Amino acid sequence: MPDVSMYCTQTCPYCNRAEMLLNKKGTQVRKIFVDNNPDKMTSMIEITGRRTVPQIFIGELHVGGFDDLAELDSEGKLDSLLQ
């Protein structure tokens, strides 16, 4: 199973929903908190080109945010990415 990491904040409801979906799939998520850490936020923006959280990575693949993750799941593509 590939490593899953997520740029997030402590209070983001979409981050919580993404983590719940990934946990339901049996995946542990390494959370990278960007609130109160401008260097991590800058790094996230440089890597993804996006300023919103969550930003989710499965292995080296940038999945995007929660809506992108949920779409992959509804299309039946998420499980294969997690194997």
Image: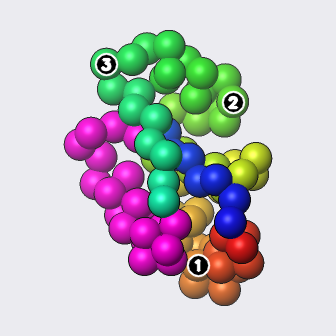
Q: Is residue 12 above or below residue 2?
A: above
Badge 2, how many Cα within 10 Å: few under 14, some, many 20+?
few
Considering only order in the chain, which callout, 2 or 1, is on the residue closer to the N terminus?
2
Q: Are marks 1 and 2 in contact (CB under 8 Å)?
A: no
Helix, strand or loop at label 1? It is helix
Q: Disc 3 designates what residue? A: 36
Q: What amino acid type should be assigned to the residue bearing mark 1?
A: Asp
Q: Position of residue 48 (x, y in %)?
A: 66, 36
Q: Disc 1 designates what residue? A: 73
Considering only order in the chain, which callout, 2 or 3, is on the residue closer to the N terminus?
3
* Disc 3 from disc 1: Cα separation: 31 Å
The span shown in magenta is 8-27
Q: What amino acid type should be assigned to the residue bearing mark 3?
A: Asn
User: In the rendered image, which quarter is residue 37 located in?
Assistant: top left
Q: Disc 2 designates what residue? A: 47
Task: In the displayed orientation, state which residue is furthest to the top.
Answer: 39
Screen quadrant of the C terminus: bottom right
* Disc 3 from disc 2: Cα separation: 19 Å
